[in-house]
């Protein structure tokens, strides 16, 4: 077995110190709010309730922080991805939100998927 090139304890400290899940949650809330304002019917159909109820009643669970290298760019680009699961009141998974950040913690792009 090969040794991982990243110290997992230091990586965990990096995640906590820089509040990566907190940053992603801020963008997640903004993403959902914009979607609700622009397409309330689609939002309600997919999320099964209003924006206000999603924010107040749904659970947001930290899932993944990953360092990624995208080889489709020249030179390849490094970035962070932070994923949060969204569960309804019954505990059913509704969506997964992922925010992609550069290493200055600026949002590159984000997405919401099933």
Image (tube, rainbow, N blue to C red):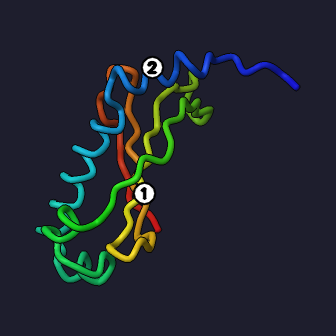
Which secondary structure, mark 1? strand
**Which quadrant of the view contains residue 23?**
top left
Residue displayed at 35% across by 43% down:
109
Identify the residue position indicated by label 2 in the image: 13
Q: How busy is the neighbourhood of tag 1: few (under 14 within 10 Å), some, or many (20 plus)? A: some
Query: Going by the picture, which residue comes out furthest to the front?
Result: 90
**Which quadrant of the view contains residue 93?**
bottom left
Identify the residue position indicated by label 1 in the image: 85
Front-most of residues 67 and 3: 3
Residue displayed at 18% across by 52% down:
30
Which secondary structure, mark 2? helix
* Residue 40 to residue 1: above or below: below
Residue displayed at 24% across by 75% down:
43
Q: Which mark is residue 55?
A: none
In front: mark 1 or mark 2?
Answer: 2
Where residue 65 appears, as percent x and y from the top left, is 49, 36
**Which quadrant of the view contains residue 45?**
bottom left
């Amino acid at each position: 077995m090969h040794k991982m090139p990243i110290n997992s304890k230091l990586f965990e400290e990096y995640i906590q110190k820089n509040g990566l899940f907190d940053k992603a949650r801020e963008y997640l809330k903004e993403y959902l709010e914009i979607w609700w304002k622009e397409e309330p019917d689609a939002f309600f159909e997919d999320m099964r309730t209003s924006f206000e109820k999603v924010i107040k009643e749904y659970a947001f669970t930290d899932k993944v922080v990953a360092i990624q290298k995208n080889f489709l760019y020249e030179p390849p680009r490094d970035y962070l991805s932070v994923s949060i699961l969204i569960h309804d009141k019954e505990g059913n998974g509704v969506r997964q939100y992922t925010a992609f950040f550069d290493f200055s913690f600026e949002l590159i792009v984000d997405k919401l998927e099933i």
